[in-house]
Amino acid sequence: MADALTCARTHGRVPQDLAGAPELVRRYEQGTPPVKALLKVAMDARRLGAGLHLPQAFLIDAAADYLTDHDQLTEDWAEAALAALACPAHQAPLRRTTPRHPRRPLGLPAAATTPLPVSGPVFRLADYLEEHGRTTRRRLCPPASVWHAAHTHLTDPDDLHNLATAAVDRQRLQWAYHLWCKAADAGHPDALLRLAGLRERVGDREGAETLARQAADADYVAGDQEGAETLYWQAADTGESLLGIETRRWPYGLDPDGSPTPPWL
């Protein structure tokens, strides 16, 4: 405590100093290019809506566009960087962890959306670095490697839906579409409704109704199927944007397999 009071005498952030915040920031800012790349991936993923537990495969693949041709990388750069980040100094900037699955009382139905099990280790970003990233990187759009790695490696429907929404906000519409497709395949009701909106606007009303019913079956609007469909069609009739863009201006057709053709493909 005496050391913390001494270090914090100019700025007064005693709790942050006790938590090792200055050391965490120093390790981030002065880290090797691979260390900084992995931390940037984790910070960007968290601020865009990914869950606490980030798969190792996602972190490594997403780091590709945070590295440059001038960075001298060894074959084991990822393993070395993760090992360096796991070394505690007050706490580790990025540590390996084991996710705990939520328990539900006996007799309650299973959740409508069930994430597939993640293969391989998962990591958690230090809380202070997460907040640091939300502040210092709030105006930065993640590079393409993040969206590609998210679509390839993330399995939680909520994570996929959150990242799709973030992609729309940043005009990454192609990735938003594909991330919503993957979330819808896992039964996420909001993703199903957004895809239903696309199908209805390109004239595939039958496909839109099917997706809307799937959203209702996924316990949307507290399991009220009729209410869910009513809500969807009210949104469609008023021209409400279901993809983050004005759906009444959707002038595109269907692919040969019957899926809507986004304007960005």
Image (cartoon, grey):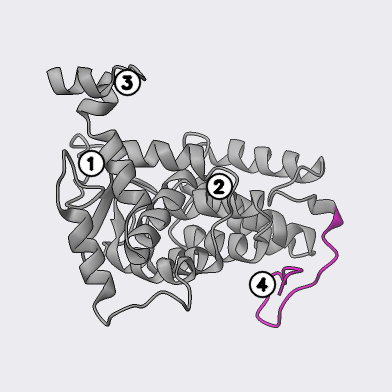
- Upstream in the sequence, badge 1 or badge 2? 1
- Upstream in the sequence, badge 2 or badge 4? 2
Can residue 220 be seen in this snapshot? yes
Quadrant (top left, top right, bottom left, bottom right) of the C terminus: bottom right
Q: Main secondary structure of the magenta part?
A: loop
Disc 1 to disc 2, C-alpha distance: 22 Å
The residue pinned by badge 1 equals 102
Seen from the viewer's position, the closer of residues 7 and 159 is 7
Give percent across and percent down for residue 6. Answer: 21, 20
Badge 1 amino acid: Pro
Which mark is nearer the camera, 3 or 2? 3
Which mark is nearer the camera, 4 or 1? 1
Do the residues bearing badges 1 and 3 touch, measured as CB atoms within 8 Å? no
Badge 2 amino acid: Asp
Quadrant (top left, top right, bottom left, bottom right) of the N terminus: top left
The residue pinned by badge 2 equals 190
Give percent across and percent down for residue 204. Answer: 74, 65
Where 63 falls versus 132 (above or below)?
below
Do the residues bearing badges 3 and 2 touch, measured as CB atoms within 8 Å? no
The residue pinned by badge 4 equals 259
- Left/right placement of residue 162 relative to residue 243 reads left
Seen from the viewer's position, the closer of residues 109 and 128 is 128
Q: Under tag 1, what secondary structure?
A: loop
